[in-house]
């Protein structure tokens, strides 16, 4: 749902994983005074995301 609003302005989607098997996906949006972000992080085990480790921080 968050990505549906990324049709205008400056939009950045970044992702990375550390050697410690911790991954993060960050979505940032800015269009004038409309600024928002979401950071989603999770651990990976056996090649899969571990649902129990999922964390999400969203700003308006």
Image (cartoon, rainbow, N blue to C red):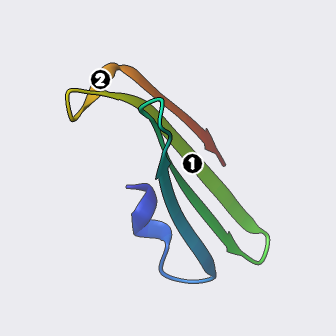
For label 1, the crowd category at 10 Å Cα-Cα, with few meaning under 14, some 14 to 19 and many 20 or more, is some
For label 2, the crowd category at 10 Å Cα-Cα, with few meaning under 14, some 14 to 19 and many 20 or more, is few
Residue nearest the observer in this picture, 2 or 45: 45
Residue of label 1: 38
Q: Secondary structure at mark 1?
A: strand
Residue 12 higher or lower than 7, as above or below: above
Residue 49 higher or lower than 51, as above or below: below
Please count the marks in the image: 2
The image position of residue 43, as x and y in percent, is: 39, 27
Residue nearest the observer in this picture, 44 or 10: 44
Q: Which mark is residue 53?
A: none
The quarter of the image holding the N terminus is bottom left
Which of pointers 2 and 1 indicates the residue nearer the eye? 2
- Between the residue at mark 2 and the residue at mark 1, the CA separation in whole angstroms equals 17 Å
Residue 5 higher or lower than 15, as above or below: below
Residue of label 2: 51
Q: Secondary structure at mark 2?
A: strand
Direction from residue 33 to residue 39 in the image, left or right: left
Identify the residue shown where x is 49% and y is 73%.
Answer: 6
């Amino acid at each position: 749902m968050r990505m549906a609003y990324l049709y205008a302005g400056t939009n950045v989607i970044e992702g990375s994983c550390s050697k410690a098997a911790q991954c993060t996906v960050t979505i940032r949006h800015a269009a004038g005074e409309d600024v928002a972000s979401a950071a989603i992080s999770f651990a990976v085990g056996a090649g899969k995301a571990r649902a129990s480790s999922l964390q999400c921080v969203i700003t308006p």
